[in-house]
Image: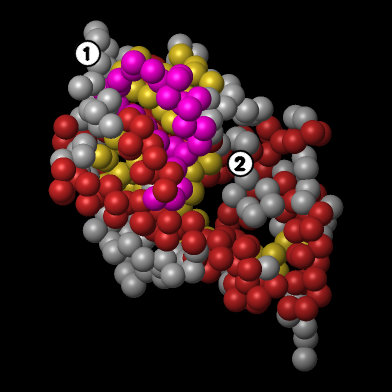
Amino acid sequence: MATTTSSPTVLFIGGTGVISTACARAAVTDGFTVTLLNRGASSTHAPAPGAEVLTADIRDREATATALQGRSFDVVVDFLTFTTDQLTANLDLLEGRFGQYVFISSASAYQTPPTHGPVTESTPLRNPFWQYSRDKIACEDLLVSRYRDAGLPVTIVRPSHTYDHTLLPFSGGWTVVQRMLDGREVVVPGDGTSWWTLTHHEDFARAFVRLLDRPQAIGEAFHITSDEALTWDQIHQEVAAAAGVEARIVHIASDAIAANDAELGASLVGDKSNSMVFDNTKIRTIAAGWNAQVPFRRGAAEMVAWHLADPSRQRSDRELDALYDRLLDAYRPRAL
């Protein structure tokens, strides 16, 4: 049984990541009694003021069991599970100690490439290109099975590309911005015209907390995204404008990138290269009146300003930078 208190109790497994920090802050603001369980390793995201912090690595079962000894919660929010083995271990550890288990999945689990849009929660789950997504789908399958067979009180949430001031939307992060600042060309996969949805973490959090301790959310899956979609050319141009420069864009096929870097290619072919626009009708059935309020232009300005404020944040990935140069040398369009 979950603990009964004057305010609902919620345990965040994680709580100091890009998305979870905003969600924990929103939960505190909304009157939840918030506990965070994590390693205390984040150097960029402080715990939400007013939240209790328990220091333990969720993969260390003995340390986690000790930290949570004798405790139960109205809601457990799991930001740190990526495989069914991890999920099974968490459920075994917490069995009978929560009233709702909120699993953070991924919108990359949706059918890739999509056959039609916009994407809704009933869009099939299938991603043959990216193991990360397949593992999230397997976790969802396990949770749905336990809900059907034993009434596990689960809610599944699928964030799309959610960011804050610390997280640039490019593979390699600052590497791409530094190339812009240096007047060098930047690689945009495909022809730059596929649509992509970027969601500010505070917008996500305002809707997310409306799912907590809500019986109507049990057994359901939701995505939470902005209604603004931009092309990848526009995304690069907005970040360049925030940095006070122009983006010198060169388009290179995602398949060509994948042939030169399998890991980067999987994240493109299995996610970012596909047009993804979402229908948020379902989340609004619970979060009535919710709308995303932060346009990406403002988000881009926040990102660039944060990085420029401290040189230590302006770290380029030398290997990725060199990969971009090789790709440009090999695939840059040339006049006949």
Question: For numbered disc 1, what is the local secondary structure?
Answer: loop
Q: How is the image coloured?
A: secondary structure
Q: What residue is at 73 percent from the left and 78 percent from the top?
A: 331
In the rendered structure, which segment of residues is drawn in magenta?
58-84
Q: What residue is at 81 percent from the left and 34 percent from the top?
A: 311
Please identify the quarter of the rendering in which residue 248 is found.
bottom right
Q: Which is nearer the eye, 200 or 10?
A: 10
Left or right, 95 with respect to 292, comes to: left
Extreme top residue here?
A: 6
Residue 60, above or below 85: above
Left or right, 247 with respect to 126, comes to: right
Left or right, 159 with respect to 245, comes to: left
Residue at mark 1:
4
Q: Which is nearer the eye, 229 or 115?
A: 115
Image location (x, y in percent) of residue 254 = 60, 72
- How far separated are the C-alphas under marks 2 and 1? 37 Å
Residue at mark 2:
167
